[in-house]
Amino acid sequence: MIAYNQDAAGTVCIVGLGFVGLPLAMNFLARGYRVIALDTDKRKLEALGKGSSHVQDVPDRQILGGIASGRLAFTDRYAMASAAETVIICVPTPLAPDGAPDLGYLLDACRSLSPVLADGQLVVIESSTYPGTTAEQVKPLLETNGKRAGTDFFLAYSPERIDPGNRSLGIHQIPKVVSGVTDACLERVASVYRTAFDSVIPLSSTEAAETMKLLENSYRFINISFVNEIAMLCERLGLNAWEIIEAAATKPYGFSAFYPGPGIGGHCIPVDPLYLQWKAAQSGAASRFIEAAQQINRRMPAYLVQEIEKHLPAGTTVDGARILIYGVAYKQNIADARESTAMAIMEALLARGADVRYYDPYLASVQLPDGSVMARSELSAAALEEADCLLVLTHHDELPVRLIAEHSSFVYDTRNVVAAVRPGAKLVTLGNGARKDR
Ligand SMILES: NC(=O)c1ccc[n+]([C@@H]2O[C@H](COP(=O)([O-])OP(=O)(O)OC[C@H]3O[C@@H](n4cnc5c(N)ncnc54)[C@H](O)[C@@H]3O)[C@@H](O)[C@H]2O)c1
């Protein structure tokens, strides 16, 4: 039995207050915990301290309520973490410029935590990462000050499975997979997480839990790429991929529907498969499915530019064409353009000389791959009438279908959300090759 500070019972420290950490902090707060919310970004902390949330799924009033209750404190001081029974790490795990995993943020957080680690404390890693990270990278770092995992403190891995923008599923309702570097660590994380999540699923090792997360996201990566390949194939065959997918989805078993789109973006789905691929390469192995999916995904921006050009009025090219984009977030109903395929599409259109503007209700400005910043344009009847093409990339709930249909001369819809346009105007839907005028 590992001794721990009884005063710390009921206190959780969340390290990294981003799209994952902040909602997680709110979940523990709602379950009656005291929460120490820790981040190295002082500007973020200042805004949060005033009750201003940067994560759309966390309303300001929730933060203000937490502060008023006296159970929520924001800090950049790792020393504060010693006061918690459980420390949960949710810092970024991006790719390095050479495409290899960049564990810099995670290892920095562990280095900062190690000297202040308290006896009996539970440390849980929630960042997505490759198998072996917790046991081979995190454990030795946390043990540098003489404390042993499983003897003096508990070390666990529990992958985050949050679905940003999903308004129907609370974070506590998503089954929580947990694992520990020893049996005692597993028992400890399972017992703490059972108090905060409706369902807890223990796995045999941290490597298994790390791989499970990469499997989930690789599955999405491969299936979305596959369905985009089917969409391109259907266009060649004169068929409507959307009709075909809907029909396949009526099968009560053995088929999960994925839908065409402009490509895969975000901080997780395009990144995690490459973590798995990198780890596989260490043992001389590789996933050919991930490789193929990556090729298809990378091809999407060039394919879309080529398709738009094909459907512009005769004699016109993309060069000089006014392209207004609706939606640049990597998925619907969120204010996140990280790794969004829209950025690569904008870059490709700009490189071809197009006059590119965008409208996204969630993003007032975006940074393009070359580092320049583009501010949001307006989406009005006049702006639509001036555009040579309205390109729908993200299907936010707010998408004004009627306005678009009534005022655009040419709509290229990658999401199948615009059903019809005014007489004389042109509508092309990605994956629908059944239209007579294609
Ligand atoms: N965003 C998602 O939908 C999602 C879903 C599942 C899993 N994940 C995984 O969760 C992890 C976090 O992702 P995110 O989207 O929340 O990232 P994010 O960039 O939104 O937030 C990370 C936060 O960590 C802070 N940070 C960085 N280094 C730190 C340090 N050393 N100490 C303290 N704070 C530090 C940053 O300032 C930032 O506020 C990643 O591994 C990601 O792959 C993300």
Image (cartoon, helix red, strand yellow):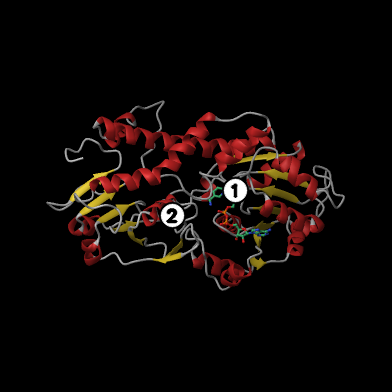
Q: Nearer the viewer, residue 389 or 240?
A: 389
Quadrant the N terminus occupies: top right
Q: Which residue is mark 1?
A: 95
Residue 50 x, y percent position in the rendering: 56, 73
Residue 376 seen by the camera: yes
> For residue 115, what is the image quadrant?
bottom right
**Counting other residues with Cα less than 10 Å from the Cα at mark 2, is it few (<14), some (14-19), or many (20 or more)?**
many
Residue 29 x, y percent position in the rendering: 60, 59
- Residue at the image position 20 percent from the left and 62 percent from the top: 385
Q: Secondary structure at mark 2?
A: helix
- Marks 1 and 2 close (CB-CB < 8 Å): no
Indicate the amino acid at tag 2: Met
* CA separation in Å, label 1 and label 2: 17 Å
- Residue at the image position 56 percent from the left and 42 percent from the top: 272
Residue 202 seen by the camera: no
- Residue at the image position 35 percent from the left and 51 percent from the top: 393
Residue 6 x, y percent position in the rendering: 78, 56
Q: Which residue is mark 2?
A: 343
Check the image and report above or below for 393 versus 380.
Answer: above
Q: Indicate left or right for 431 with 36 as reference.
A: left
Q: Nearer the viewer, residue 188 or 55?
A: 55
